[in-house]
Amino acid sequence: MHPYLEIHPEVQKALTNGQPVVALESTIISHGMPYPKNVETAFAVEAAVRETGAIPATIAIFNGKCYAGLTEEQIRYFGQAENVWKVSLRDMPYVLSKKLYGATTVAATMRIASLAGIRIFVTGGIGGVHRDAASSMDISADLTEMGHTSVAVVSAGVKSILDIGLTLEYLETKGIPVVTYGQDEFPSFYSRKSGFNSPLRLDTPEEIASLLYTKWKLGLEGTVLIANPVPADREIVSDEMEIHIQIALNAAKEKKITGKEVTPFLLKYISDHTKGESLEANIALIKHNAKVGAMIAVAYAALES
């Protein structure tokens, strides 16, 4: 056992027995949604994983340890507590050494999942290359971590507030396979379309699990990004969403919002100005991702057995 890792007994039992386990991030609880929607969504996502035959492991940091698997009480705490750190890789040593509460981003969740031996991770949307990256050099640590940590990521694509085209180029440079589940076009978080073709397409969880198994058996380190489009009845059309994104980006610039505060600000701003429609789309897509991710985890566990 790693000295900075604490695995929930149910999760540890599943890992020991070769049962499918799905890692879940905690940033969506502390920084992605308002209370009580955040806690309700966290419980619904864990339930979706269980209903599909896998064990959920929500990941967070507190008491100087990385926790893989939280209790209901702990999830409720992260949903209501103030001053919870948004933890990416650079923040982990500080937050752990100071024994602070930290909600993990995609990058930090991947690293902790890997330490625990969990292969499949479900999130809403990944970070990427920001739209002003040519001048700001703002590229998410998610992408760097994806290049060398062998944990598959199931998401609804790249967050639409980012530069999707440049993010796809960056992923290609890093040698990260990008697979869209069930369609040819790469999705853009709130929307099923992005205007960019997906590099790869697979139509079943079993095919995706086979790809993962093959990649890692070849000794090729790093993730596979599995893009799972938001359900058609819950999407916001990309042209409509782009209008809200541009307004939100201008507001962030006026308020001089920078660094890791940008994404939470933009998501909240867009939610407020779409009368909650974007929040409902976000909730729908994370639940859908949890179901698909659990199906992939079940198929992958069968290959490993």
Image (cartoon, rainbow, N blue to C red):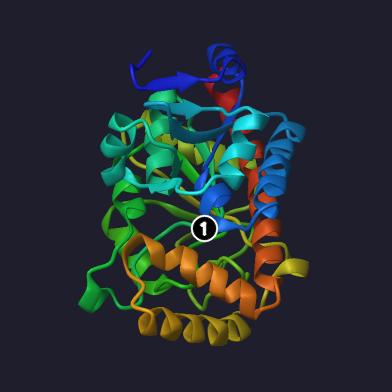
Q: Mark 1 = which residue?
A: 125
> Left or right: 139 with respect to 252?
left
Amino acid type shown at disc 1: Gly
Residue 175 screen position, x and y as percent:
30, 52
Quadrant hosting residue 302: top right
Residue 212 against residue 83 in the figure, above or below: above
- Location of the N terminus (image quadrant): top left
Q: How many labels sit on residues?
A: 1
Quadrant hosting residue 96: top left
Is residue 180 at least partly visible in the picture? Answer: no
Residue 69 screen position, x and y as percent:
56, 27
> Left or right: 180 with respect to 164?
right
Q: Residue at left 39%, top 74%?
A: 163
Closest to the observer, 93 or 129: 93
Quadrant hosting residue 242: bottom right
Please, what secondary structure does the residue beneath circle 1 have? loop
Residue 170 against residue 236 in the figure, above or below: above
Residue 272 screen position, x and y as percent:
63, 75
Residue 296 screen position, x and y as percent:
61, 38
Q: Residue at left 68%, top 37%?
A: 46
Residue that sits furthest to the front in the current view: 82
Q: Residue at left 36%, top 52%?
A: 142
Is residue 287 at least partly visible in the picture? Answer: yes
Residue 213 against residue 154 in the figure, above or below: above
- Location of the C terminus (image quadrant): top right
Mark 1 is surrounded, within 10 Å at the Cα level, by few (under 14), some (14 to 19) or many (20 or more) other residues, namely many
Q: Residue at left 21%, top 78%?
A: 135
> Left or right: 257 with respect to 28?
left
